[in-house]
Amino acid sequence: MILACENLSIQRAGKRVLENVSCGFLPGDITAICGPNGAGKSTLLSALGNLIAPETGEVRLSDKPLPEIHPLTRARNIGYLPQSGEIGWDVSVANLVALGRLPHRDAGIAEIRQASGACGLDALQSRPVSTLSGGEKARALLARVLAGTPQWILADEPLAALDIAHQLSLLEVLKGEAESGCGVVLVLHDLGLAMNHADRVLVLRDGKLIADGAPEEALSPENIAKGWGVNARWLGEPGQRALITDV
Amino acid sequence: MTRATITFAVLLALAVPLSLLAGRVWIDPATTPNAALILAELRLPRAVLALIVGAGLGAAGAAMQGYLRNPLADPGLFGIAPGAALGAVIALYIGATSGLVLPAFALAGAGGAMALLSLIAGRTSNPAHGIALFTLAGMMIASLAGALTALAISLAPNAFAMSSIVTWLMGALTDRSWDDVMMAAPLTLAGILVLWRAGRSLDALTLGEEAARSLGVNPRWLMAMMVLGTGLTVGTGVAVAGIIGFVGLIVPHLVRPLTDKRPSSLIVPSAMAGALLVLVADVVCRILPLVTELRLGIALSLIGAPFFLWLLLRMRRGLT
């Protein structure tokens, strides 16, 4: 099952935020979408989840245009984790995670238990979400997506506002999902995390795709200069890179 | 059956028989003359109507708060109650008050408000703006209907029409018959059913509009369900009882601590609690030794406002 977009252009409030973006995603890969603020990263992710209608072009899942797929079938296949982290009512962790089963119209006890376990929520099941720390809340929201057992996980800045330990624990969960065949697409601001943990990186700037490839190649110092206008270089070995910027 | 449904079922089982006996004259079925007739033709339809109106308002309030993800939301926000009131006021203005004509006018008013609301808010191309536009459109319809109602009062042809409009607006269940019950029951039940069906989508909205759509929720369908459900429940409530405030706002707050806080698990218990609240308030109206019977709308605000303040104080203590 392949997720791909072709010649995607999107306008928001009269401004072109995505221009002619074509890219495909592979199951089993962690793909990071990087780029400066306002580059169109979240818009691309929303379009991949069919949450925003493109002006031209289309997104296809297994060669079928997304709008032609029944919303519930689409929801079972594509899990979307928004950046907002909004939880409107003070439900328990168990009930929050269970929301992930809505598209399946079943109780999904085994899936919910598995997702909760993977995100380390076993001890927090009955806790109201208002009593969770930021890290626990992020894990609970990710577990909500995993409970739907999607083939694709689209997550918008899932690691922002988390400390380094929580970032790594969440990444471990996502890597586990990718290893079991799930396609993971993340919007990431932290280039170090993208460099060391993604299988592939897309770089957007002003709505255009300026790089697409393995992290070492897509996040080369030249591309960082082109994308962010910052002179930077990588230190360390592959997989343990650290970014140094010239101030 | 959840804790909340069981609690309110027990309370209703106690309150309904008591309410039939309570009134300006307390009925002792064994000794009061014509007890059976009074119960069957006066008190029972009135009690049933109180239950229906309250259930509709409670369910609409719960669904509305879930839809707007705001505990301050009230079914009145959508402009459906003011629209229904305007319909009824027009009936009173032109003197068409016989039988079910007035409720029919009120239902037409509610339908008009619903149609206007769908027409304005249903056309947004960006679903992300849907709920905000919807609420603003509802508030504007409410204020327009309110202004037209005030206009009708100020232009009333005579003092009698003016007083009957003002009195009607205060809400009451006096002198209602089985005809009113027959009209209100199916419409309100259908409305509650529609809102209950929307429960799953309302649960998804807990995560925000975008996440809800990613879970397969169709925002247009949900909006239509909300307009239809609140239109049927609130519109019918206003048609048979006038403006009854507070129930839709207060009841979900009362019920929420007894549930798991998911919007879907709030709708049925809120219907039951709303039924209980309106029934009790109507009994209070009947037994208070006043020269003329206290109007139900006033009684509910008199009970509701201090109770809500008490609830707020208790919540504040819980927070500190």
Image (cartoon, helix red, strand yellow):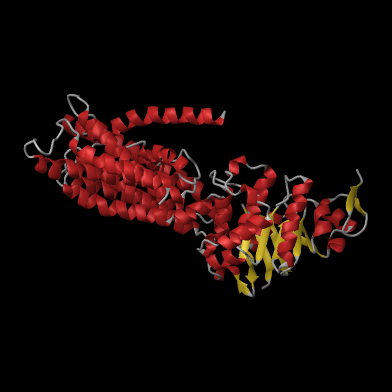
The answer to whether residue B155 is visible is no
Quadrant (top left/top right/bottom left/bottom right) for the N terminus of chain A: bottom right
Q: Residue at x 40, y 38 (%)?
A: B249
Say which of B165 and A19 sits in front: B165
Say which of B26 and A59 sits in front: B26
For residue A223, what is the image quadrant?
A: bottom right
The answer to whether residue B28 is visible is yes
Indicate the position of residue A150 as horizontal and vertical percent values: 63, 65
The furthest residue to the bottom: A63
**Position of B300 relative to A40 (above/below):** above
Indicate the position of residue B59 as horizontal and vertical percent values: 38, 47
Q: Which residue is drawn at 17% across and 43% down?
A: B97
Indicate the position of residue B23 as horizontal and vertical percent values: 18, 33
Left/right placement of residue A228 relative to residue B247 reads right
Quadrant (top left/top right/bottom left/bottom right) for the C terminus of chain A: top right
Say which of B305 and B31 sits in front: B31
The furthest residue to the left: B33
